């Protein structure tokens, strides 16, 4: 912890990279691990775009049962807030996140690069109309899968599912930020999903120090300069002064 404080104090350009673990303490379950969402819902059915096109009702059932209420109720925790303070102080260049929950922005972070999209809006794949999640959730009471009210087309949240490409502009900016920071802090990610998980390696290759804050081991731990296997919120709030 002392070492992390010193690294933050001495860094010129810091980038944070976050995964589901940073939002776990806001009540949003992670994907992997014993309580993980993908233990209960097979991601090949519930989060794969090819499956979604075969039958979107699987995804929408999952959204109704396991996502909507959890995401609605979640609020930023001390970890999100610490990163926002660091950005506000001009010390954090960007937050690259795999999360779709919007909690970094809710905590006040401005430069958030969402590699996997977000669940704030649900779009019609046919006519492009956007809907808020509340409206679609209501619609789910009587209609599964829900259809576009304008054209009857397929509705899909603006998240990146397995089998889909990441948004090119965001991926480009994230790669650029990773390649020009001197301290890269990965928080709450298992670092197994590509291409997101290549960001720490890009930073490391470009000469940055790599810190991994995660409860469980990750495949990149042996390449990191510092590994802290503790709660994301306590580590970040402890390392970033009020
Ligand atoms: N503090 C720190 N780490 C935590 C905490 C916590 N409070 N709670 C859980 N963790 C760690 C776990 O040890 C786990 O390794 O967070 C990690 C979360 O890993 P995943 O569930 O795999 O989440 P993530 O890395 O974000 O997943 C990447 O997979 O399914 C896709 O699109 C989804 O963006 C997601 C991607
Ligand atoms: Zn439409």
Image: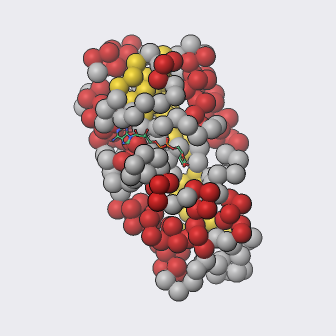
- Please state the total of marks drawn on the protein image: 0
133 lies above or below 174: below
Position of residue 38 measured from the top left corner of the image (x, y, whole percent): 50, 54
Question: Splitting the image into 4 quarters, where does residue 170 fall?
Answer: top right
Q: Is residue 85 above or below residue 38?
A: above
Q: Residue 52, position in %: x, y?
A: 66, 65
| Left or right: where 25 falls relative to 135 | left
Q: Residue at x 51, y 67 (%)?
A: 62
User: Is residue 194 toward the left or the right of residue 10 in the image?
Assistant: right
Q: Quadrant of the N terminus?
A: top left
- Residue closer to the observer: 177 or 140: 140
- Location of residue 63 with respect to 114 vertically, above or below: below
Residue depicted at x 56% and y 13%: 207
The percent coordinates of residue 108 (x first, y second) are 39, 44
The answer, for residue 88, to whether it is visible in the render is no
Which residue is pictured at 57% across the width and 83% down the height? 143
Query: Looking at the rendering, in which quadrant would you find the C terminus?
Result: top left
Q: Looking at this view, name the residue that lies furthest to the bottom.
A: 142
Q: Position of residue 160 (x, y in %)?
A: 62, 52
The colour scheme used here is: secondary structure
Q: Quadrant of residue 109?
A: top left
Residue 70 vs 202, above or below: the answer is below
Residue at point 65%, 77% (across, down): 148
């Amino acid at each position: 912890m002392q070492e992390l404080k010193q690294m933050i104090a001495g860094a010129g350009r810091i980038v944070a990279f976050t995964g589901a673990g940073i939002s776990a303490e806001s009540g949003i379950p992670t994907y992997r691990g014993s309580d993980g969402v993908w233990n209960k819902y097979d991601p090949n059915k519930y989060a794969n775009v090819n499956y979604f096109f075969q039958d979107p009702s699987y995804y929408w059932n999952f959204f109704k049962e396991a996502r909507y209420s959890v995401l609605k109720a979640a609020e930023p925790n001390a970890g999100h807030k610490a990163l926002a303070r660091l950005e506000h102080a001009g010390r954090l260049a960007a937050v690259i996140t795999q999360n779709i929950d919007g909690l970094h922005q809710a905590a006040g972070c401005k430069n958030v690069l969402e590699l996997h999209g977000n669940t704030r809006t649900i779009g019609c794949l046919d006519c492009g109309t956007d809907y808020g999640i509340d409206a679609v959730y209501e619609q789910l009471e009587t209609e599964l899968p829900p259809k576009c009210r304008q054209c009857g087309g397929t509705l899909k949240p603006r998240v990146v599912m397995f089998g889909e490409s990441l948004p090119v502009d965001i991926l480009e900016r994230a790669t650029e930020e990773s390649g020009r920071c001197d301290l890269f802090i990965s928080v709450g990610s298992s670092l197994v999903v590509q291409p997101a998980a290549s960001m720490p390696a890009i930073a490391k290759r470009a000469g940055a120090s790599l810190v991994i804050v995660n409860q469980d081991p990750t495949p990149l731990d042996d390449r990191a300069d510092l590994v802290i296997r503790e709660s994301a919120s306590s580590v970040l709030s402890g390392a970033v002064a009020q």
